[in-house]
Amino acid sequence: MSGFATEKVTEDIAKLKVGGSAPDSSSSTGAAAASATAAMSQVASMKNVNEVKQYIMQQQIAALQKKIKKKEGSETHKFWDTQPMAKKDAVISELVNEAIDKNTDPEQVRQTPYSMPAGFEWCEIDVHDEGELQEFYALLAANYVEDDGGEFRFDYSKEFLMWALTVPNYRKDWHVGVRSPAKDGKPGKLMASITAVPALLQVHGVQMSVVEINFLCVHKKLRDKRLSPMLIREITRRVNLTGRWQAVYTAGALLPGCKARCRYWHRTLQPEKLIEVKFSFLPMGKTMPQHVADLDLPKKPLHAFRSMLESDVSQVTALLNTYLRTLKMSQIFEEHEVSHVLLPRENVMNSYVVQGDDGVITDFASFYNLKSSILKSTKYSELLAVYSYYNVAGSMSYEELVTDLLILAKNQGVDVFNALDLMENQSVFGNLKFGRGDGALQYYVYNWNCAQLTPQEVGLVLV
Ligand code: MYA
């Protein structure tokens, strides 16, 4: 792929070196120690508790502002401005639907991995190796996506990671890690990751083989050292070598080339716990019993949903693709993908169908399980959340279908049912008492130009 200026790569690597890259190495810890000493002497000079409280509050506000600024992104992007992505404020006509960089010759792609700072190494993460899967799990559990307030962090289970990364035709060399320098004969620690899995994507009627990029993660001790651009360049190189030139990904960060801005909505299932852990708040003027009663649901689903079976795969594939093709951007599934991705798996994937007496499957509904660690509660350590996945309502209204999903989730002991405002979801949020979340989720297609989409035009859920 053209456009990868070598000097940029060198500059990114240099930054990583200058920053003191070993996880337990000095310079980032040194800077932290210096600012802690400065803060302590400032606190020591204060006259009373109120002054200290005010100081702490100012520090917290400043940290939050920094986080928000990072999310909303800056005007210039040292890395992203070198990539085949539309500029942030570009208005693209409905008539445009094409690759930005039209080069599709794998022979022009760099054949060897990008070099790493001394001692650091690229590695493949073998999810079939229990030890490596555990290391990957641990990296994400301690360093992956958190909310702005630092109260919750995604806790992807090992079963979930295995499921997400072993879709049909997955490649181990697309599960990329970075290891720190080996020490005392022991291999280095897994410090960063990025993954790609193959998928079929349809954008404005054009179908293409893409990869879905996920699990970009840099250990907290290596942040702000430009390691992410290196990971992204390396995964791009590996994917390009196989003749794929587009990728789809989502991020909380607002970056160049955003195709759709979506938002999470949340339907409380366990009000008391969610309020206790500060996931949500008691509505003004309501008592807890009133709030609990408000959010009550029937004990059993209203329709004859049953768990999806292997024998349903062919009908579900047809039902799903027929619906997804009506949207402007969507994933398209092959039968063997539906079999891997959508068949029920305990604590990972829940999928249900309604089948008429004539054997025809009329409705499909699904959600996936993804816990979050609760970081600041002394009583609870886990938030049990599920996320709406793909749904097609044929014999019932969409609202009835989602009501049944809420009941099925609640009967599993789930705390909260989350859904993005894409596909038809938005139409039921009001009646089904979902609350608007504060986190936006941006959708991107790498190396593709097309007009901006509304959330309702998006038929793709990335886990
Ligand atoms: S989204 C999940 C992302 N992960 C997390 O949020 C976990 C917690 N955070 C971290 O681990 C780090 O903060 C990350 C950044 C790794 C996010 N997507 O290394 P840096 C740009 C893309 O010094 P760090 C997911 O997994 C940023 O604008 N770029 O920063 C999908 C800046 O560039 P520029 C991002 O904070 C990932 C540069 O990185 C993101 O230490 C899709 C700074 O690098 C982000 N979420 O680490 C990846 N956040 O200066 C793209 C920041 O230009 C795939 N940045 O503004 C592209 C397609 C590739 C394949 C193509 C094949 C054809």
Image (tube, helix red, strand yellow):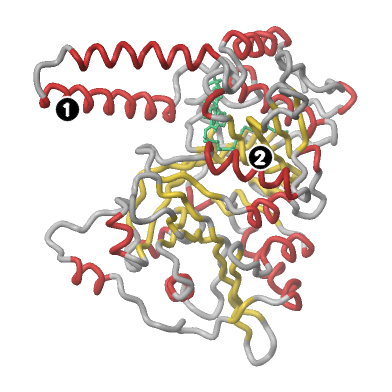
| Residue 217 or residue 254, whichever sits in front | 217
Find ligand 1 in the image and state its quadrant: top right
Q: Secondary structure at mark 1?
A: helix
Q: Residue at x 50, y 47 (%)?
A: 154
Q: Secondary structure at mark 2?
A: strand
Q: Residue at x 48, y 31 (%)?
A: 254
**Residue 402: mark:** none
| Residue 377 or residue 126, whichever sits in front | 377
**Residue 53: mark:** 1
Q: Residue at x 65, y 37 (%)?
A: 97
- Eyeballing the image, is 101 above or below 455? above
Q: Is disc 2's CB within 8 Å of ligand 1?
A: yes
Q: Which residue is mark 2?
A: 213
User: Do labels 2 and 1 touch, CB within 8 Å?
Assistant: no
Dot 2 surroundings within 10 Å: few (below 14), some, or many (20 or more)? many
**Residue most extreme to the right:** 107
Q: Earlier in the sequence, mark 2 or mark 1?
A: 1
Q: Position of residue 358 (x, y in %)?
A: 68, 90
Q: Is disc 1's CB within 8 Å of ligand 1?
A: no
Q: Position of residue 187 (x, y in %)?
A: 75, 29
Amino acid under disc 1: Lys
Q: Position of residue 293 (x, y in %)?
A: 24, 74
